[in-house]
Image: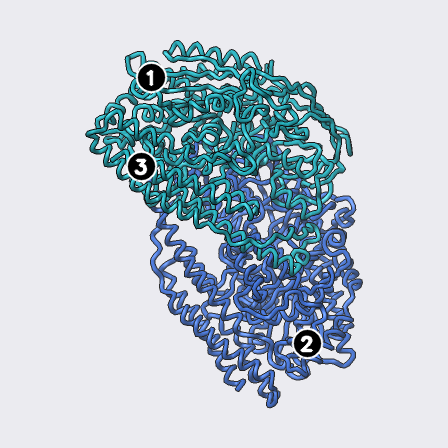
Chain colours: A blue, B cyan
Amino acid sequence: MTPLTARFVACLVAAAVPAVAAFAASAPTMQGFTAASAEKESALEARFDAGLSAKEMKGWLERMSSAPNQVGSPHDKANAEFMLEEFKKWGWDASIETFYVLYPTPKRELLELVAPNHYRATLTEPPVAGDRSSQHPVGALPPYNVYGADGDVTGEVVYVNYGMPSDYKALERRGVSVKGRIALARYGGGWRGLKPKLAYEHGAIGCLIYSDPKDDGYGAADIYPAGAGRPAMSLQRGSVADMPIYSGDPLTPGIGATKDAPRLKREDAKTILKIPVLPISYADARPILESLKGLRAPANFRGGLPFSYHLGPGPAKVHLVIESDWSLRPVYDVIAKLKGSEFPDEWVIRGNHHDGWVFGASDPLSGNVSMMGEMKAIGALAAQGWRPRRTLVYASWDGEEAGLLGSTEWVETHADELAQHAVVYLNSDSNSSGFLYAGGSHSLQRLVAEVAGGVNDPSGSATVLARTRADSIIEGLEGDGDGQREAHELLTGGELALGPLGSGSDFTPFLQHAGIASLNLGFGDNEPGGVYHSIYDSFDHYIKVEDPELAYGVALAEVAGHTMLRLADADLLPLRAQEFASTVNRYVEEIDALAEHMRVQTRDTGQLIDEHIFELGSQHLDPVGPPPREAPVPFLNFAPLKNAAAALTTSAKTFDERYAATIAAPAGLTHERLAAVNAELRRAEQALLSADGLPGRGWYRHMVYAPGLHTGYGAKTLPAVREAVEERHWAEVPTDVTATTAALEAYRAVLEAATAKLQ
Amino acid sequence: MTPLTARFVACLVAAAVPAVAAFAASAPTMQGFTAASAEKESALEARFDAGLSAKEMKGWLERMSSAPNQVGSPHDKANAEFMLEEFKKWGWDASIETFYVLYPTPKRELLELVAPNHYRATLTEPPVAGDRSSQHPVGALPPYNVYGADGDVTGEVVYVNYGMPSDYKALERRGVSVKGRIALARYGGGWRGLKPKLAYEHGAIGCLIYSDPKDDGYGAADIYPAGAGRPAMSLQRGSVADMPIYSGDPLTPGIGATKDAPRLKREDAKTILKIPVLPISYADARPILESLKGLRAPANFRGGLPFSYHLGPGPAKVHLVIESDWSLRPVYDVIAKLKGSEFPDEWVIRGNHHDGWVFGASDPLSGNVSMMGEMKAIGALAAQGWRPRRTLVYASWDGEEAGLLGSTEWVETHADELAQHAVVYLNSDSNSSGFLYAGGSHSLQRLVAEVAGGVNDPSGSATVLARTRADSIIEGLEGDGDGQREAHELLTGGELALGPLGSGSDFTPFLQHAGIASLNLGFGDNEPGGVYHSIYDSFDHYIKVEDPELAYGVALAEVAGHTMLRLADADLLPLRAQEFASTVNRYVEEIDALAEHMRVQTRDTGQLIDEHIFELGSQHLDPVGPPPREAPVPFLNFAPLKNAAAALTTSAKTFDERYAATIAAPAGLTHERLAAVNAELRRAEQALLSADGLPGRGWYRHMVYAPGLHTGYGAKTLPAVREAVEERHWAEVPTDVTATTAALEAYRAVLEAATAKLQ
């Protein structure tokens, strides 16, 4: 669903990562394995690797992306059934689990410019030379943003840039309002679903979202078919459900959308938007944008079309009609299990979705076929008599694009079992050539670094870890203060760190609702995804532009597969505490610094307002009024958080040391003792849940990681406290500090319990 | 010549500048005036203001911009003669001083794309609706870059972005060379003349410079006639003489280009470039740019044309022919004097040029007619019997556009007199609506702030100072670390500071060759000058877009006129030392920090090279190799500079205190004592000259202010030391530190002498 954003970054924990690790690691460190177990595991991984076939992955990709495969389409169902058969053939205990979700599809769409002249939007993506599937998009839905409202509205247009909160502030200071009008936003700058939501909150009656060529067209790349850039008539479909409130079926928050589940009335579903919204191409946006007058758009609003951008309102006026079929549709999750030989009640879970917006070759099938490769290779190991010590659960989710439907309903349905059995959830989605992007729970950071240090990158003789470290250093040094700091830490021996997870793929229900330690892995480079969610995300495109021989499909299968195998076979679960502790400490410091920064900025802005600086400094061609005056930022008590974070550091160090000592001298590590320690480790992440959840969105219960209420995909860490500060809800800060502190203390208690059982 | 860049910025010296000064300052502080003199001076300024007429200025502007007025054109001469007659009528002792300069003009120009298809560049600026003079550009020269070489070259094209040193580094890391090829650069990012110079130094055989619409076209503004943006077929003429070596006639460096002056052979003139160069519009550049292949241009190379930019080389190949008439031409400086009643040998000098590239309404005539307004108002005061105490010298220069020809030759001709008599040189050039931009010698900072605090801004009831302060704060807060610091200093009572002067207008020979304390003043906003040096810089454009009623023409005349009158009439010359001292201290700190920054960066880059980070982190679509390895940065001895700067601080404080005490209790301030102190103050700036001049460019003798060898217009402060550090000429640093220290010590000695005479 989402372009890769979570990624390795440098971490404060210094660790002995070799600068340019050779491929064949001579003496692998293997978190959680005794020396004897590690040796066996290395041999197993080599056999696993031998079972991976890029050619097979490419064949599956071609087959599965051969027809539109959105929810409800025949090919989506056929893909699920194809996988079911294959999984069974490969020796997995597989079945399809079906849920019934609200899934609107367009019956009628119209967009026309009605003033100052007439233009009817084509809303069509024409065939591109050399792209076979674009010639025959039979069964594709008209382009739309799922979970927007139906409507028939006519109004003046206002150009709102990315349609983010800062854009509305800029408009307000220029006296431009969307009230009673139609907001025209460009893609980018924040999550798609926020654009119509914020437009609605500011009074707009409709919203259009177009792809500006500066962002993922010719301003960013060569245009497909020459490169990865978006063609003029291409557009980005996508969900606009209010997922920062909850993911999954809008009618069944918190419970599985089984056939007979109790359902909300549609009008009571909080995640369905209130105004119509439509994604359009820049070919269709251009006549509208070009006929806007009013103030010239400020510099950061200007896109790549060859004229001067204006804000409006009007004289451009558009007529927008959307009428949908609001039926329930089935989603088909394909679930496959391989029972653990020793700890069958400990589940190591892996998933990737299989539904696309049209052909979905890159998103999601590139990741899905890589996962299938893992499954076939594991099946082959099993056929030779090997069994994982823990149970492996692999899932190919349906309905991710619309709102993580398949994964969320499955997690909600199996919540109690997951609380008992789940060890880790490992997610992937789109995959491409490039560098490993890895995000997730920081207790898994060392594990991922170890695995990535043992997988060769398809580009040559370096490991995946070395390539990713190099990319992180280069990007960091070119970036802001944080990037520079991270790069310097990496250059002085720092460990590659996981990025925190926000949302945008199927890890969300596992991590943020169910409290299961999670990872999200995928390869990519820094190229814009210019065919993202368009008809041109095709097999031909993938083979031409992304990963011609699926070499990175194999690399992903190796990284994810080794991670799964280690989680399945480790003696002690391969989690560590110090990386998590140091990361949490950094988050606390960030929030403290943020509040201080806001205090200074609020005071300065107040002085500017008092001294009429904004009026005096206003330019005649770009008159900008003062911002609203904010109340002074109070001093806030973060001491409880700081104390909890400090205590966590101490407990984490003790735990990691005891863990290392135990695994180094494993005599006496009986099945029962392993099970007892691992039971503690398994529930550690769940300790970070709060029963009440986050303020205003109780479905999200994780107190360390969440998607931002106003970022959508982007992570907010320690979200209750951080968002209270960001949103200036000062009165709520103490409650949020208390709840977050409690979660950190609960985590520490689990660590202490685990430490005790290690002794 | 140059868009306004030098400007007020915040200064470290705290001073009591009222936040929003009311227009009518009740008790004016007036640097250098006793209380009694100040009162008279205020009354005089009010009478001066009453003599200013926006209507007259507008009339002169229309008349003088009615035909092309480049050097050698009939209308340029007619304008000089018109001014001469007017100045005489107004009571000035006026004459025309003529110099004879090398001034090539095009005889033949051809630019054609010869592969992969054919296109012949129009090199023509067509009429624009509503712009009358663009309909009849009779007498305009073909567009060209004066002092480029003649040539007939054909070669593959390489797109070099702005053609600055960092761009060549980026190209080198991508394996792209201009050797034997033709460089296509866009305007911006640094001085025009550097583009062909650097192209030549990298082996190019020709250079094209086009105006990208992102920089001053639709990406930056509405297109003329709707706004200030550059039309598609408009282009920027301009000089490409290597002025950072010396300004003025290329054949007579250091001496006046009188009829019989000894002249270099053309091939020995260091400031004439070696390859042909041509300015073109983006309409003409587009067919070339669009047919380039090779690597995709990196993000910061991409402009505003609606396609993906590539670097080449080729397949675009162009044929470029330039053939010129290399005649000598006359330049006509109009010089007008009003003899001082009391100190006739002390000259206060004012100048603005009168030659344009075509019609030159904004550049330079807007500033020139404002200066004429001053002269007429001063003439009226003189007609009523008033006389300045010091001699006023007003000059309307010719030939500024080609290379500060008229001003440089005049300064070189009158060097000895100027060394004896000159007090200050005050320059202006283009003027427009907006905020006051002021740059100059920091001994004049307080004077300018006082004057600007006493002039009402045409936009309303605030002073020019209050508006400019507000603009500086807003821009500073939106800017980088330096901007933020400056804004915070302004918010906490800091004084508005002068920007240091680089080059780009006629102050250069006065300040940087002759050591005369200088100022450069003008109004403008932050809009791009999209008709800059084009045929559309016309009266109609000026009245429509820039300053419709010449209200800012009057404001400039008030600010410049009051400054001139105060310099002419002050008891003690209105210079202060502490602002200069604190500014110099800051420059020393900057250079120290720069060396430290370079040391860390060089070490880090070395580590990246050692660890093969650039190869490992290279992206397949944008392969970038490592930069060249630099030798480690040695530790450098800046102690002599620091000691000199510290001593300057002490001496400056003593001087300013004694000066203030003297002017507050002026009994005993005889004519002789005033003359004695003022003689010291007059020579203070000259103490900052070094006889040897700057390394490799001895014509530039000022050791504090210079145009950068690789920035052109942009200032380099403490240039000998700073450029040695920037260019990594480590072995030269000690010599440069010694020379710069000597200049600061010499300045301090003058201050001490002045202090002694104040007692």
Q: Is residue A7 left or right of residue A756?
A: right
Residue B182 place in picture, x, y as percent: 71, 34
Q: Secondary structure at mark 2?
A: loop
User: What amino acid type should be assigned to the residue bearing mark 3?
Assistant: Val
* Residue occupying image coordinates x 57% and y 35%: B188
Q: Is residue A110 left or right of residue A579?
A: right
* Residue occupying image coordinates x 44% and y 59%: A723
User: What amino acid type should be assigned to the residue bearing mark 1?
Assistant: Gly
Q: Chain of mark 1?
A: B
Q: Residues within 10 Å of mark 1 (few under 14, many from 20)?
A: some
Q: Secondary structure at mark 1?
A: loop
Q: Which residue is mark 2?
A: A27
Q: Are marks 1 and 3 in contact (CB under 8 Å)?
A: no
Location of residue A482 with respect to B406 vertically, above or below: below
Q: Is residue A218 visible?
A: yes
- What's the mark number on residue B51? 1
Q: CA distance from mark 3 to mark 2?
A: 72 Å
Q: Which residue is mark 3?
A: B20
Q: Residues within 10 Å of mark 2 (few under 14, many from 20)?
A: few
* Residue occupying image coordinates x 57% and y 57%: B603
Residue A320 place in picture, x, y as percent: 58, 41
* Residue occupying image coordinates x 68% and y 28%: B276
Image quadrant assignment for residue B236: top right
Q: Chain of mark 3?
A: B
Q: CA distance from mark 1 to mark 3?
A: 27 Å
